[in-house]
């Protein structure tokens, strides 16, 4: 009897280990037909499809750095065009500030109402942080290019200081990280040795820094005290992404984290503990459209998201556009 049971167990194990035979040949159908298939582990998430709101231009410009002001105006970067644009609640589009030989990539409103901009040179090898007091105003240097950083995105805390992502490095070489600029101008690297730190956001109570590591496809969650001191055993990586993607990010009033997935045409949403709970898909993504979804903004008064995106060179559509979708909760107040 024991010999029979042992033999039966071996047959069961062999049957479980044998690969399932589904077809006689591979084919580019179903999930294999799209350039950015959704991983199996994420297919069961709550999913909504975004709706078109505004075509910004039809010149394949890269859009970035979306933020709202307290009046519900949306601001975003036209990286290719070297300018920041403004979209009113009535869908009227205008240039807010045009930069001379610089490409903006991240935005945040400060507590004094100025718009802070992370900018880089056309080659993407040097960057700085500027601030402008109003439409058509003259930008002032806050963090100069001589400091050696490559700022990509930024977010203010309740003290009037701000964090920015230093996007240096590559998949095999670290060099960037998350940097804090205190209200008195003191600069401190809080999270070092990251490979192209990209998005950065704060929990509603300013205790948690969320950051995306673009070159290594990771989501960081770091608890801090007094803005710069890491709390022991409270810094970890709750999620690792599949495929190219984690770009800019935002946090809503409930503490949920929204990550724009570059080259995937979607936004992934995480709860305050870093578990994925939802996703927003851009229309046409399965056909290769609207894949360059770099950034988003959450309306400060409504459960609404705005997503900026454009199309890769191989896409038939040249449109750079803004889409709208529901959110779990309203966004955080601009400038804290």
Image (tube, helix red, strand yellow):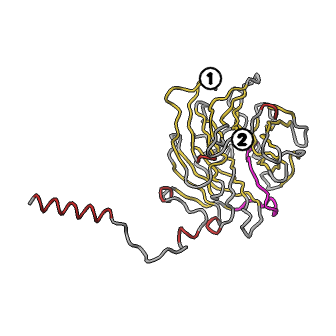
Q: Do the residues under discs 1 and 2 have CB atoms within 8 angstroms?
A: no
Count neighbours of disc 2 (C-alpha within 10 A) and say few if under 14, some if 14 to 19, many if 20 or more: many
Q: In which quarter of the image is the N terminus?
A: bottom left
In the rendered image, residue 151, in percent from the top left (x then y), is placed at 74, 39
Say which mark, if any, is on residue 52.
none
Tell me the distance, in whole angstroms, between the alpha carbons under discs 1 and 2: 21 Å
Task: Identify the residue at horizontal 67%, vertical 37% (top origin).
Answer: 176
Q: Does the magenta stretch include residue 61?
A: yes
Q: In which quarter of the image is residue 33?
A: bottom right
In the rendered image, residue 265, in percent from the top left (x then y), is placed at 64, 59
In the rendered image, residue 138, in percent from the top left (x then y), is placed at 91, 38
Q: Quadrant of residue 168?
A: top right
Magenta stretch: dominant SS?
strand
Asked whether 76 or 120 is in front, the reply is 120
Q: Mark 2 points at which residue?
A: 153
Asked whether 185 or 132 is in front, the reply is 185
Q: Nearer the viewer, mark 1 or mark 2?
A: 2
Q: Give the range drawn in magenta.
A: 52-70
Q: Determine the residue located farthest toward the front in the rendered image.
A: 172
Please indicate whether residue 177 sits to the left or right of residue 94 in the image: left
Please indicate whether residue 140 sits to the left or right of residue 238 in the image: right
Q: Is the residue 316 above or below the residue 122 in the image?
A: below
In the rendered image, residue 222, in percent from the top left (x then y), is placed at 56, 33
Q: Determine the residue located farthest toward the bottom in the rendered image.
A: 24
Asked whether 1 or 316 is in front, the reply is 1
Q: Is residue 313 magenta?
A: no
Please indicate whether residue 4 sits to the left or right of residue 280 in the image: left
Task: Identify the residue at horizontal 61%, vertical 67% (top origin).
Answer: 286
Q: Quadrant of the C terminus?
A: top right
- Mark 1 lies on a secondary structure that is loop
Task: Identify the residue at horizontal 68%, vertical 44% (top origin).
Answer: 301
Q: Name the residue under label 1.
A: 226
């Amino acid at each position: 009897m024991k010999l029979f049971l042992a033999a039966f167990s071996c047959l069961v194990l062999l049957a479980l280990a044998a690969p399932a035979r589904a077809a006689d040949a591979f084919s580019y159908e179903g999930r294999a037909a799209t350039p950015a298939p959704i991983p199996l582990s994420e297919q069961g998430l709550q999913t909504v499809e975004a709706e078109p709101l505004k075509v910004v231009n039809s010149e394949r410009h890269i859009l970035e750095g979306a933020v709202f002001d307290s009046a519900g105006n949306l601001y975003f970067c036209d990286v290719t065009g070297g300018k920041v644009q403004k979209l009113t609640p009535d869908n009227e589009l205008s240039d807010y500030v045009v930069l001379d030989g610089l490409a903006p990539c991240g935005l945040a409103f400060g507590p004094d109402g100025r718009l802070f901009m992370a900018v880089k040179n056309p080659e993407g090898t040097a960057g700085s942080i500027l601030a402008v007091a109003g439409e058509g105003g003259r930008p002032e240097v806050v963090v100069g290019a001589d400091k050696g950083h490559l700022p990509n995105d930024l977010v203010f805390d309740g003290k009037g200081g701000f964090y920015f992502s230093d996007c240096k490095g590559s998949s095999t070489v670290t060099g960037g990280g998350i940097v804090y600029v205190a209200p008195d101008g003191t600069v401190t690297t809080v999270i070092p040795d990251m490979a192209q730190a990209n998005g950065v956001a704060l929990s509603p109570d300013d205790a948690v820094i969320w950051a995306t590591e673009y070159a290594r496809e990771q989501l960081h969650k770091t608890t801090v005290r007094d803005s710069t001191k890491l709390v022991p055993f409270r810094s970890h990586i709750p999620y690792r992404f599949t495929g190219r993607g984690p770009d800019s990010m935002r946090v809503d009033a409930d503490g949920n984290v929204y990550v724009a997935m570059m080259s995937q045409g979607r936004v992934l949403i995480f709860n305050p503990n870093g578990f994925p709970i939802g996703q927003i898909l851009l229309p046409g993504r399965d056909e290769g459209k609207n894949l360059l979804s770099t950034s988003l903004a959450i309306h400060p008064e409504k459960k609404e998201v705005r997503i900026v995106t454009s199309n890769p060179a191989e896409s038939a559509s040249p449109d750079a556009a803004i889409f709208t979708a529901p959110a779990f909760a309203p966004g955080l107040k601009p400038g804290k």
